[in-house]
Image (tube, rainbow, N blue to C red):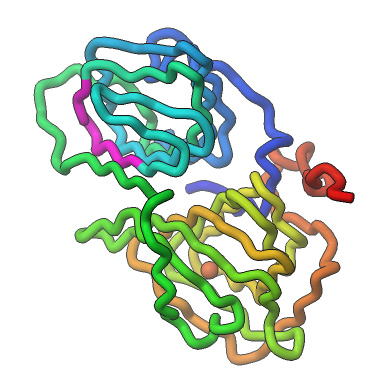
């Protein structure tokens, strides 16, 4: 079980370096969240320019990733910025490199230990050039109509119903009357803000903000002044929206009021703010 984290600015978390003998040695990383029992984790990996690894690179975990900056080259496949990848456990490739470096949002479904057996992967790998994919503007929940949500679906697991997608919210979106119902889901919702900002009861998430919200926790309503794009995952099963009967208030000036486990308390500063624009 991972604790409720809502929300932290990833810029404030420390970089560490992956040890020799583990997957991706010498790559820097910062944990966004981690399950201490299974080792499943969400992290930002920073591959230094010129990093290269050849040979048997198989690991025991499913790996999902989204390239934020730079480029990863895996055999002859290029994962440039805004490319999504999914490598099932035991996925084999001959070489991985980052000639110019890369910053990659990465999710492992268990401790990413080296695999040395002879079992084949259970699924195919996925590569999606999200940059050149159209936004799906089809609205899916009328209670979210005020946000003008658009999507780019990246992965849906046919067995578990788990989903990964990019979510875009239009600028100047706020709940009508500055109040609205709260939603909750029977599964984990996890998100990393790639650009823009989103305001909710815990304050305003800026680029680099991250939350891990366990099942059944009411959240929202949300609004955004200038729109936002975030990568969202529903983990542990199929996502549905469950709505509260009553309304909760909304304000663009909601102060930063995070829910954080003890190990993140010291990073509960005021959110990172972008440099002045004027
Ligand atoms: Fe939600």
Q: Name, please, the residue furthest toward the right.
A: 278
Q: Position of residue 269 (x, y in %)?
A: 82, 44
Task: Specify start and end residues of the magenta stretch as a single range.
Answer: 85-93
Report how many numbered discs are placed on residues in the image: 0
Q: Is residue 192 magenta?
A: no
- Give the quarter of the image for residue 200: bottom right
Residue under the point 80% across and 74% down: 251
- Give the quarter of the image for residue 28: top right
Nearest the viewer among 2 and 163 is 163
Can see residue 109?
Answer: no
Q: Position of residue 120 (x, y in %)?
A: 10, 31
Can see residue 223?
Answer: yes
Nearest the viewer among 276 and 247 is 276
Residue under the point 76% across and 84% down: 178
Residue under the point 16% across and 43% down: 123
256 vs 149: above or below: above
Q: Position of residue 13 (x, y in %)?
A: 69, 33
Residue 95 located left or right of residue 209: left
Residue under the point 47% across and 71% down: 185
- Give the quarter of the image for residue 259: bottom right
Q: Position of residue 207 (x, y in %)?
A: 66, 48
Q: Name, please, the residue furthest toward the top.
A: 20
């Amino acid at each position: 079980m991972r604790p409720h984290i809502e929300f932290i600015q990833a810029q404030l978390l420390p970089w560490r370096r992956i040890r020799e003998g583990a997957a991706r040695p010498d790559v820097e990383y910062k944990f966004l969240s981690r399950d201490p029992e299974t080792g499943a984790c969400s992290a930002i990996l920073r591959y230094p320019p010129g990093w290269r690894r050849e040979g048997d690179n198989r690991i025991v975990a499913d790996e999902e990733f989204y390239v934020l900056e730079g480029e990863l080259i895996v055999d002859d496949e290029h994962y440039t910025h805004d490319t999504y990848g999914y490598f099932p456990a035991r996925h084999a490739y001959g070489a991985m490199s980052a000639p110019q470096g890369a910053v990659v949002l990465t999710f492992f479904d268990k401790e990413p230990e080296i695999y040395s057996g002879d079992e084949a992967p259970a699924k195919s790998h996925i590569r999606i050039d999200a940059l050149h994919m159209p936004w799906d503007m089809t609205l899916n929940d009328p209670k979210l109509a005020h946000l003008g949500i658009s999507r780019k679906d990246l992965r849906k697991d046919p067995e578990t119903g788990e989903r990964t997608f990019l979510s875009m919210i239009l600028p100047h979106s706020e709940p009508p009357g500055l109040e609205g119902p709260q939603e909750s889901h029977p599964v984990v919702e996890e998100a990393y803000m790639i650009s823009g900002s989103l305001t909710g009861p815990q304050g305003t998430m800026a680029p680099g903000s991250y939350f891990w919200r366990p099942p059944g926790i009411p959240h929202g309503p949300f609004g955004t002044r200038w729109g936002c794009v975030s990568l969202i995952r529903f983990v542990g099963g199929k996502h549905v929206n469950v709505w509260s009967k009553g309304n909760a208030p909304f304000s663009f000036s909601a102060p930063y009021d995070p829910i954080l486990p003890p190990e993140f308390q010291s990073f509960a500063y005021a959110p990172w703010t972008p440099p002045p624009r004027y």
